[in-house]
Amino acid sequence: METGITVRPIEATDRDWVVRFLQQHWGSDRVAAHGELFYPADHPGFVAVQQGNAVGLVTYVLVADACEITLIDSGIPFLGIGTTLIEAVTKAARQAGCARVWLVTTNDNLDALRFYQRRGFALVDLHPNAIQAARALKPEIPLIGQYGIPLRDELYLEMSLTDETWLAPWFCADHTSPI
């Protein structure tokens, strides 16, 4: 199925749109994770575009040999937008010489856990009650998350860029090349 989704790097002129997108989809332009507060609009990333409209966003940071996805959001689920954004970040990480791509999500985000694992990410760490510390940095984090699940833990997922066995069968079946 052709979705007509293209991806382009975030440009300086996109910053105001990125901030509005974050506020609309996340309720804030800041994110708290792993004990830090950061602003994804200040990070490099990619915008997914369909028929001239921005429909998704991913931001990341590169540190040493790792690429951390600091935010990913598909405005329209189940169209391949998120997968296309993951592919763009993975390609950028490889070009930068990174050995892995990683991210943090929360214990309530069951849809994200399914999404990431089907695309080759593996759970590598659990930080119980980390959301309590995150709320000290960002008090607007709710007590109850998706599906009525108490929001308390951070889950770390990682994709190796040096070990090709990370590729999920689903990921390979729908793509002509791994990345």
Image (cartoon, helix red, strand yellow):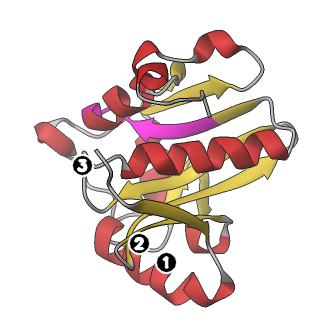
User: Residue 138 sits in which quadrant?
Assistant: bottom left
Q: Residue 18 carries which label?
A: 1
- Left or right: 28 in relation to 67: left
Is 127 placed left or right of 146 in the picture? Answer: right
Per the image, label 1 sits on a secondary structure element best described as: helix
- Name the spot of residue 6 as percent of width and height, x first: 48, 62
Q: Does the magenta stretch include residue 103?
A: yes
Contact between marks 2 and 1 (CB within 8 A): the answer is: yes
Q: Which class describes the residues within 10 Å of circle 3: few (<14), some (14-19), or many (20+)?
A: few
**Among the two numbered marks 3 and 2 on one chain, the one whose residue lies closer to the N terminus:** 2
Q: Can residue 34 be seen in this view?
A: no
Name the amino acid, label 3: Leu
In three-dimensional space, the C-alpha distance between marks 1 and 3, rounded to whole angstroms, equals 26 Å
In front: mark 1 or mark 3? 1
- In the rendered structure, which segment of residues is drawn in magenta? 102-110
* Amino acid type, callout 1: Val
Q: Nearer the viewer, residue 35 or 124?
A: 124
| Callout 3: SS | loop
Residue 114, given in percent of the width and then of the height, sits at 32, 27
Residue indicated by mark 2? 22
